[in-house]
Amino acid sequence: MTIWQKKNKILITCPKGVSPYLKAEIAALGFPVTAETATAIQTQGTLADTMVLNLHLRTAQRVLYHLETRQAGTPGELYGRINSLPWEDIIHDSGRAGYVCVTSTVDSSLINDTRFVNMKVKDAIVDRIRDKMGQRPDSGPEKDKSVVHVYWKNDSVEVYLDTSGERLARRGYRKIPLQAPMQETLAAAVILATGWNGEGAFVNPMCGSGTLAIEAALLALNRAPGLLRSNYGFMYIKGFPDELWQEMRKKTRATADKKKPLKIIATDINRTAVLAARQNAQTAGVDHLIEFNVCSYERTALPAGGGVVVLNPPYGERMGDIRKLESLYSGIGDYFKKSGGGYRGCIFTGNLDLAKKVGLRSQRRIIFYNSEIECRLLTYELYAGSRKTTTLQTVTCL
Ligand SMILES: C[S@@+](CC[C@H](N)C(=O)[O-])C[C@H]1O[C@@H](n2cnc3c(N)ncnc32)[C@H](O)[C@@H]1O
């Protein structure tokens, strides 16, 4: 049996707050959920299964395949235990694929700098490969080839292959960086939390770089986010079944909806943002499914028929000035009241004081984290009776 067929524990990480959505995704793919924490879901499968998980999961950050758990209390023991594993069967010793990056999570009173652990583990791996193969792979911080992750707590070290390499949030479509973009995985979780399922409109004023609208289009079409990426950590593990991977991609591409009617609207007051969002959507292959406009949020028309309107306004941690933001947030409340009848209104923000300025009673307050910032997705059921203005002018300036 090769390493590709061996069933083992698989740990799938996610941003804090996202695990319920990740858990549902994993279960929907037919994998068992064997444990869960706030930032990871554990399942079981082969290394070949990690290809499926990397390809399909929208809310995952990394898919970590468990190799071994060993006892190690000191850095010397860590070196010895890692060095005893058969790395020559796993990592290429030379050529383009001959490169290894080590990452770690350490919970030990002996260690205050994970870089020391990374170096110890890297030395143990490359020394082993040089001893067995006569040459050793390069090493460094780049995560675009093989990546080994160790989790060292007390006397126990868990060794994983990071089959994602670069984190899965990096779908590859966001080519133009803007201020305060939302991570793609977080955006996918936020859309799932809004309850939007492709029925009705998805309207995203304040779209910034377009992440929410793009993820909404991918989700509604059942288009696997992993199809957008061509590089994963698993490709650099010895014996990588390239043919199986190509076949898997082909089948997955064929199951996406090609022509599902969708109403997705993305607007922003900033013309540069809208240009970037359109460009990003084009890279993701969904620009033809999204109506882009340059306009202020309150001039974004909500089409008849209902749906979801989601705003991620600036919240003062990274952009904007608090006083101006207070009137922006109370304006969003007015916009919802005047124009949102029949819609579920949603606001994603990291500033709860600002959220109070909306002045509407939220139905749900779902906790998420944007990096270290604790955020809320606030949802409001907006009833048709409160809709005073049904026709707002849409500004189409592009
Ligand atoms: C936090 S960013 C949104 C980031 C976005 N979710 C993304 O992933 O890139 C907030 C956006 O609100 C826009 N904005 C600020 N005031 C606005 C207004 N009055 N009307 C419309 N958009 C506005 C900004 O131009 C900015 O792009």
Image (spheres, rainbow, N blue to C red):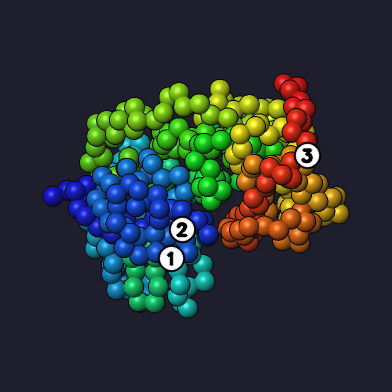
Label 3 near label 2: C-beta < 8 Å?
Answer: no
Graded by Cα atoms within 10 Å as few (under 14), some (14 to 19) or many (20 or more), the crowding at tag 3 reads few
Q: Nearer the viewer, residue 73 or 47?
A: 47
Give SS at disc 1: loop
What's under tag 3, amino acid-wise? Lys
- Whether residue 108 appears in this view of the structure is yes
Percent across and percent down for residue 357 are: 79, 56
In the rendered structure, the answer to whether residue 253 lies left or right of residue 60 reads: left
Instruction: Look at the image and tell me in which quarter the C terminus lies.
Output: top right
Residue 6 locus on image (x, y percent): 19, 53
Q: Residues within 10 Å of mark 2 (few under 14, many from 20)?
A: many
**Residue type (three-letter) at the residue carrying disc 1:** Thr
Query: Is any part of residue 178 visible from this angle?
Result: no
CB at mark 2 closer than 8 A to ligand 1? no
Q: How busy is the neighbourhood of tag 1: few (under 14 within 10 Å), some, or many (20 plus)?
A: few
**Residue under label 3:** 388
Q: Is mark 1 within 8 Å of ligand 1?
A: no
Q: CA distance from mark 2 to mark 3?
A: 39 Å
Number of marks drawn: 3
Lateral position of residue 105 relative to residue 343, left or right: left
Are the two marked residues, 3 and 1, in contact with CB atoms closer than 8 angstroms? no
Disc nearer the start of the sequence (3/1)? 1
Q: Which label sits in the foreground, 3 or 1?
A: 3
Sequence-first tag of 2 and 3? 2
Secondary structure beneath dot 3 equals loop
Q: Residue at x 78, y 39 (%)?
A: 388
Give the residue number, with chain letter if any, for mark 1.
Answer: 37
Ligand 1: image quarter: top right
Q: For residue 19, which numbered disc appears in the image?
A: 2
Question: Does residue 101 sit above or below 301 in this rendering?
Answer: below
Q: Which residue is rendered at x = 26% and y = 45% of the image?
A: 48
Q: Position of residue 89 (x, y in %)?
A: 22, 49
